[in-house]
Amino acid sequence: MFDLPFSYTANPSRVVFGSGTITQLPAELERLGLSKPLLLTTAQQVSQGDRLEEILGGQERVAGRFGEAVMHTPTGVTEKALAYAKDVGADCVVSIGGGSTIGLGKAISVRTGLMHICIPTTYAGSEMTPILGETENGEKKTRTDPKILPGVVIYDVDLTMTLPVSMSCTSGINAVAHAVEAIYAKAGNPIISLLAVEGIRSITSALPTLVTSPSDKDARSKALYGAWLCGVCLGSVGMAFHHKLCHTLGGSFDLPHAETHTAVLPHALAYNLPSLTPPQIRALASSLSLPDTDTATPEQIIDALNKLYDDLPVERGVQRFGMKEEEVDKAVDIAFRNQYWNPRGLEREGVREVVRRVTAGERAR
Ligand code: NAD
């Protein structure tokens, strides 16, 4: 049984999901009465922008192309893209890519009011959230506003086929982390818990298959479907220790986003598990497909996560990405600067131990 009372707010966005769905973009634009899209990509995904332009009927059917999206949405890039959008008279933005490109689309859309259509190609989940993180003068600030939520999301499984296996795994775990924290979120509710359990189950069952068969369409579909559900979780309820710590480590030590989430998740969860309620433990056990969810223990949950990681080509620590052992205390200091809600109170020694283990890349326990 779940806790009463609860509240639930659905985020309004339209989703088109399938294989080859990218070809539905012209119909989506027509439905919205839009005809001058600005196409956004990273420099690495320009060819997916080419394909989009072709589907739309060629260069004359798009207002323009901007291929300079980068991680952490620097405001300098946004300003350049905004000036370009104005110059070419765009009436909407279409972002095709991961969280970086979608972040740029959100930054343009919230400043101009232009409709934002997303075509996600990773599992990060940004397309489902009213959250935008932007970097200015080296500092990343995050804000939430319903106007940031993209209007239409086209999930096309075919576009994820090129996502390298290691990135598929870290990006998939990034999505899992959203759902894990949604299960014990302060404003959690049974609807989001259902989505979280289904999202985690879908992704974690797909990832090992993707390691051996990266082009397996069923596994790719399951992973992308799971990423959608986990993205809804992120966009619907507040996150806690895991996300705040990733934000601290990523922002202050310039660590890669999905890889940091992957290294932190088992340790942050191990820290929180002793404070979770029986329904939350059951939900986690069910999401990881443990045989007997009613009697599942925190140790079994961490064990299941460790076993999943054993099958994936992922780094368990962040040392390889530049974080040093002697920076552990600095990271803990920064982590304690902003207080936030967490199911387990933040105790300095415990948090330090999590950061130490994450830095060293130890197996969670
Ligand atoms: P990303 O968008 O930075 O992509 C990483 C790299 O992979 C890029 O070079 C990209 O071009 C490439 N790539 C993406 N999809 C590909 C594909 N299918 N095939 C080949 N290459 C592909 O990575 P990400 O992890 O999706 O996004 C990270 C960023 O998103 C961070 O800045 C993070 O803060 C943000 N984010 C925001 C939210 C939110 O709700 N606001 C949620 C999650 C992530």
Image (cartoon, helix red, strand yellow):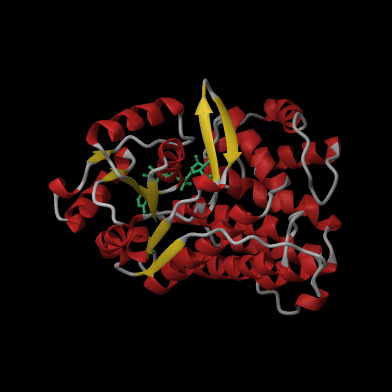
Give coordinates of residue 102: x percent, y percent. 42, 46
User: Which residue is pictured at 65% across the width and 34% down the height?
Assistant: 248
Residue 317 to residue 15: above or below? above
Determine whether, in the image, residue 73 is placed left or right of residue 89: right
Residue 257 to residue 10: above or below? above
Determine whether, in the image, residue 364 is placed left or right of residue 195: right
Q: How many marks?
A: 0
Q: Can see residue 155? A: yes
Q: Can see residue 365? A: no
Give coordinates of residue 6: x percent, y percent. 77, 63
In terms of image quadrants, where is residue 323?
A: top right
User: Which residue is pictured at 72% across the width and 42% down the height?
Assistant: 357
User: Which residue is pictured at 44% across the width and 35% down the height?
Assistant: 111
User: Which residue is pictured at 46% across the width and 56% down the height?
Assistant: 168
Q: Outermost residue toward the front? A: 33
Of residues 252 and 266, the one drawn nearer to the viewer in this rendering: 252
Determine whether, in the image, residue 185 is placed left or right of residue 107: right
Give coordinates of residue 267: x percent, y percent. 72, 49
Give coordinates of residue 189: x percent, y percent. 72, 64
Determine whether, in the image, residue 72 is placed left or right of residue 292: left
Of residues 201 and 93, the one drawn nearer to the viewer in this rendering: 93
Q: Quadrant of the N terminus?
A: bottom right
Q: Quadrant of the C terminus?
A: bottom right
